[in-house]
Amino acid sequence: MKNVKYIFLTGGVVSSLGKGIAASSLGLLLKSRGLRVTIQKFDPYINVDPGTMSPYQHGEVFVTEDGAESDLDLGHYERFMDMDMSKANNTTTGQVYYEVISRERRGDYLGATVQVVPHITDEIKRRMMKLGDSKKYDVVITEIGGTVGDIESLPFLEAMRQLMLKVGRENSLSIHLTYVPFIEAAGEIKTKPTQHSVKTLLEIGIQPDILVIRSHNSISREIKDKIALFCNVQPDCVVSAKDVPTIYQVPLELLREGLDNIVVEKLHIKNGKTNISKWKKLVNRINNPKNTVTVGICGKYNMVPDAYKSILESFVHAGAENDVKVNIKWISAQDLEKDKNTGKYLAGIDGLLVPYGFGERGTEGKIRAIKYVRENKIPFFGICFGMQLAVVEFARNVLKLKDANSAEIKETRNNVIDLMEEQKGITEKGGTMRLGSYACTVKRGTRTYETYKAVNIQERHRHRYEFNNRFRDQFEAAGMIFSGINPDRDLVEIIEIPGHPWFIACQFHPELKSRATKAHPLFREFVNACKKKKRSKK
């Protein structure tokens, strides 16, 4: 392909419409045609990255292979398109301003007055074109965060307008995602919010080429024609995106609506037809499972499921490969701290996962939950802080080190979890953890090896604390196996307990590498163990 094609996706009317899912779905459809596609997200918040933001506000922090703390939508991009994102795939307002101000401090602007236009918008455009300039891609999809009309998004939209003008309409495309509400009292679908949203874009100087309309049900031809007329788009370019049982069905709905055909026609792209037969099989397995299992998640952010977004999606992938639906039972770690009747809270589960989560709150509740499933032979999976607390639990109740704890929680004589050496001199919070992909050597003959069927693996990390190697001999003597070790620094990456139906915990975040059509091995085998546990109850 001679010229890189730029597709911009904006959202209007309300937030949380699913721009990330729409971008991922379109990326999947275009990739299935043989195109080299990537997606990038531009977030309007002034934080440099989401790494220091509360999960209650932002949801999970998705970590890329190269160690970027990024928006959770990058997880959708990776899961749908089965490809790695990088630091270049996520930009925030904070990063843009930080770069421009740094240049101004160095004197790079030679005394010029630094302004939003052109300096901020020029930096945004540079970042918008960076992936395209790499010559690695035929199509770059750019998702603009926020909602049209928000003041925070204006510089991104202005940069988008300028870039589309620069590369030409034959090489650029604007897709606007909006919502049409159904007013039950009137018995009518209302198009006015969409009209106003498009009007706001027009005031900025952007005419959408395609409208993707979110709604509870499919919208009629009549409604499509009305929207097309008042929003100045071709009728065939109004695409219905109704609610579906699973996000993985969205690409099939957009395929049925012909979105990929419209895009390639408008961008003058010549290539083969879309082939997503593998994806169709995935959706069929998700929608028609033969059995169910119940997994308890004992965490501190249970009221905000997006805080564990990649974990929840990993269970969808693993469930599909095991032909089961994974039902989640949310278990409040704080409730377990108040009520010592642990069995009451864990009743009915086929397995327990203790996820990540910084800080003291809920810690003792998680430890109680881990002790219960270890002693009652219920499959257990620990991730990051979950692994660290599994170590603490084992130290207290098997090694009889009653004051065992993590140094993050309390300094004791037996800090079996301690601050990493390179973290001790760090004062700034943002972007300073052990981040990104690191090597792990898997011990042969372990359940971990049976799971991965490989000795050398790479996994993504986000942590400051680690297993304290001073205690390794004691743990091994008591039966714990260190089945995964970082070969460069001798860091413990994976632990397991033999003779248990499934007791594995890891320092890294396997959920970040699970893909829709390729479940992560640890999630796949944990769900399989849960399935076996449920069968044994019958």
Image (cartoon, rainbow, N blue to C red):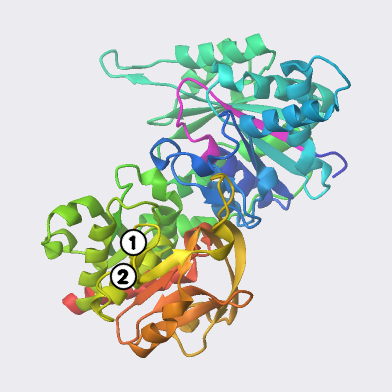
- For the N terminus, the quadrant is top right
User: Magenta span covers which residues?
Assistant: 5-21
Q: Position of residue 8 (x, y in %)?
A: 66, 31
Q: Position of residue 395 (x, y in %)?
A: 31, 76
Secondary structure at badge 1 equals strand
Label 1 vs 2, first from the N-terminus:
1
Mark 2 is surrounded, within 10 Å at the Cα level, by few (under 14), some (14 to 19) or many (20 or more) other residues, namely many
Q: Identify the residue under disc 2.
A: 404
Nearest the camera: 243 or 203?
Answer: 203
Residue 407, quarter of the rendered image: bottom left
Q: Position of residue 61 (x, y in %)?
A: 50, 47
Q: How many marks?
A: 2
What amino acid type is highlighted by mark number 2? Ala
Residue 18 belongs to magenta span:
yes
Mark 1 is surrounded, within 10 Å at the Cα level, by few (under 14), some (14 to 19) or many (20 or more) other residues, namely many
- For the C terminus, the quadrant is bottom left
Q: Residue at x 69, y 32 (%)?
A: 98
Q: Residue at x 21, y 77 (%)?
A: 375
Residue 223 belongs to magenta span:
no
What amino acid type is highlighted by mark number 1? Val
Q: Residue at x 58, y 28 (%)?
A: 44
Above or below 237: residue 309:
below
Which residue of the protein is positioned furthest toward the front in this rendering? 413
Secondary structure at badge 2 equals loop
Left or right position of 6 against 302? right
Q: Identify the residue under disc 1.
A: 354
Q: CA distance from mark 1 to mark 2?
A: 19 Å
Nearest the camera: 527 or 463?
Answer: 463
Above or below 345: residue 58:
above
